[in-house]
Image (cartoon, rainbow, N blue to C red):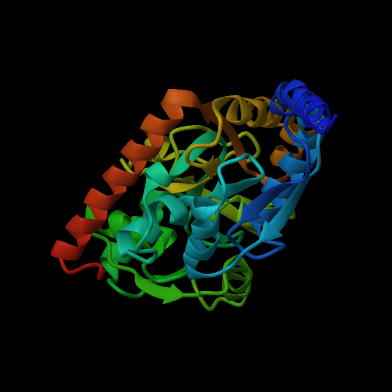
Amino acid sequence: MKLSFIGAIAAITTALAPVAALAEYPERDVRMVVPWGAGGGTDGIVRKVTTLAEEPLGGTIYVENIEGGNSATGVGQVMSARPDGYTIGALTYDSIVTVPWQGMLPSYQMDKLDLIARITSEADAIIVDADSDYQTLDDLIEAAKADPGNVRVGVQNLGGRVHLTLLQLQQLTGAEFRIVSYPGGAAPQKEALLSDEVDVVLTSLGDFANLIEDGTARGIVEFSDAKNPTYDVPTAEEAGIDLLNGSFIVLVAPAGTPEDVVASLEAAYHEAYDSPEFQDWLATIGVTPNWLAGDELDAWAEDTAQGLFTQMDGLVEAGVLTK
C-alpha cells in the first residue's frame, strides 16, 4: 500500500514536470533597472516605453532606479542577476563607454550582458541663447579662434561624454574654448545660459526642449548623421564637421538569459517602440527613435565602444584628457 502511494506521487510529479517546464514567461513581475536617478531623461524614456511593453509581454514590468558610479552600480546589479528574464536593464553612453574605459567597475565585461535592443539616439548639440550672435558653428569657431579661451562653453561632468565632444571639436578645428562644468546636468546649464554665465552649452537638444520650443534658446549644430525629427538644426555633416557623438538607450539582460525569453522581451519592446503613442511622445521631447537589435546591435556596440576608447586614449596621450 505504502509503495503504491509513493509510486502514485512519483507518477503525478513526473506528469506535472513538463507542464512546469512549459510555463509561459513571464510568471511574475519583471524588474527593469535604470542606473540613473528618477526624473531624468533616461528614466523618463525607459518608463514610457516599458509601460507600453507590458501589454504585449503579458506581465508587469516595474522600474527601479539604482544610482551611483556613472551608472556602474546599476549595471553591476544587472550583470550579476540571475539570467532568467526577471531582471533587465537600460544602458546609456556612460554604461558602455565611460565606465569600462575608466575602470569604474572592475568586474565589468560586456559579455556578461545580452543586448536586447537600442531604442533611441540622442546626439550632442551646441545650444545658444536665442539672441546670440552665433548663428552657425562657423561663427562660433571663428570667435573662439579670434579670442582663445574667451568663449565660455557649459558642459556637464568633466571627463564625461559632452566634455569629450568639446575636446574633439577643439582638436578638429583649432578653436580654444573656456570650459565650465555643471555636474548637476542640464538644469544648471539652462540657468547658466539664461543668466549669461556662459555663451553656449553642449548637451542634447532634448535636454533644452522647453527652452527651444518657447523660443528662448536654439541649436546651431547637432553632432549626428541623422536629421532630428523635431528640431530644424544642422547635422554635423551639414555644418561641415566630421564629429559624431551622443547618448543612446540600449536594453539588456544578464548573459545566459534563455533565447526565447530575450526574443519575447525584444518583441514586446519593439511593439511598444513602434506604437504611435511612443513615437509621438519622443517627438515632443526632441529625441530620435533609433531601433537596432540582433547581431547588428552587438556589432554597433562593439564598434562604438572601441572607436571611442581609441579616441580617448589619443586625447590622453596628447595631454588633453586624464584617465
Q: Nearer the viewer, residue 154 or 61?
A: 61
- Residue 307 can be seen, yes or no: yes
Q: Is residue 170 above or below residue 262?
A: below
Q: Position of residue 268 (x, y in %)?
A: 71, 29
Q: Position of residue 48 (x, y in %)?
A: 75, 44
Q: Nearer the viewer, residue 183 or 323?
A: 323
| Rendered-image quadrant of the N terminus | top right
| Rendered-image quadrant of the C terminus | bottom left
Q: Position of residue 298 (x, y in %)?
A: 41, 32
Q: Nearer the viewer, residue 141 or 221?
A: 221
Q: Residue 77's image quarter?
A: bottom right
Residue at left offset 76%, top offset 40%: 281
Q: Residue 30's image quarter?
A: top right
Residue at left offset 53%, top offset 33%: 227
In the image, taking residue 204 as reference, residue 297 lies left or right, namely: left
Q: Nearer the viewer, residue 189 or 39?
A: 39
Residue at left offset 26%, top offset 57%: 312
Count of residue discs: 0
Q: Residue 85's image quarter?
A: top right
Q: Position of residue 135 (x, y in %)?
A: 49, 52
Q: Is residue 211 above or below residue 8?
A: below
Q: Is residue 191 above or below residue 224?
A: below
Q: Residue furthest left?
A: 317
In the image, taking residue 291 as reference, residue 61 lies left or right, namely: right
- Residue 215 can be seen, yes or no: no
Residue at left offset 17%, top offset 69%: 319
